[in-house]
Image: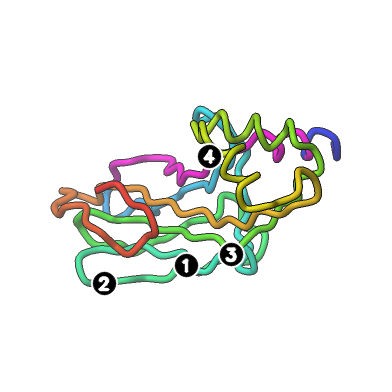
Amino acid sequence: MALATMVSKAVAHEFWIDPERYQLTTETPLVAALRVGQEFDGVSQSFLPRNFTRFEVIQGETVREVDGRIGDHPALTMEGLSEGLAIIVHETTERRLTYQEWERFLAFAEHKDFADIEARHDARGLPRTGFREAYTRHAKSLAAIGDGAGADRQIGLTTEIV
């Protein structure tokens, strides 16, 4: 089990919010999982407040923080939403990763299409092993409640598709 967890973290480069339903009535709770994986195949994360800085549902000008119990799985269950478009937002706390193998870093850089990363890394005088990376993850998803009226908009993520 521990080995499977380590392997999935080593190749997991994507983070997304996965609602059970993208269209629901006002009587139906909004339920969504937080997922980490690749090509929309990944493991569901629990509700762990220490792992996020922002987790909310936005409808119009109304912003509701996702309230849950530690360990809730799926991470989001919210009732009482009004008709309209719901924008689900999640931002993680900073994570750090130490690269002990240069080849692992190069494989990640190639996957992300950072063609000149080796030259940039060397130009900064950075070591090829034992260096660290810090990252955060940012995700947004949409769900139509009732008529689903409304529009997606920028909500302040570092990188955002609208």
Cα distance between the residues tagged 4 and 1: 18 Å
What residue range appears in magenta? Answer: 6-24
Residue 89 left/right relative to 44: left
Q: Residue at x 45, y 42 (%)?
A: 18
In the depicted structure, whether residue 53 falls above or below residue 8 = below
Name the residue beneath numbered marker 3.
Answer: 93
Q: Earlier in the sequence, mark 3 or mark 1?
A: 1
Give the secondary structure at mark 4: strand
**Can you tell which of label 4 and label 1 is closer to the viewer?**
4
The amino acid marked with disc number 2 is Thr
For image coordinates 47% across by 48% down, the residue present is 32
Q: Residue 84 placed where, x, y %?
A: 19, 56
N-terminal-most mark, 3 or 2: 2
| 50 shown above or below 111 | below
- Mark 4 — residue? 14
**10 Å neighbourhood of mark 1: few (<14), some, or many (≥20)?**
some
Report the Cα–Cα distance between label 4 and label 2.
28 Å
Locate the N terminus by quadrant. Answer: top right
Which is more foreground, mark 1 or mark 2?
1
Could you tell which of marks 1 and 2 lies nearer the N-terminus? 1
Please state the horizontal and vertical placement of residue 160, each as a whole percent of the image. Answer: 33, 51
Q: Secondary structure at mark 3?
A: loop
Element type at mark 1: strand
Q: Amino acid at mark 3?
A: Thr
* SS category of the residue bearing label 2: strand
Identify the residue under disc 2. 62
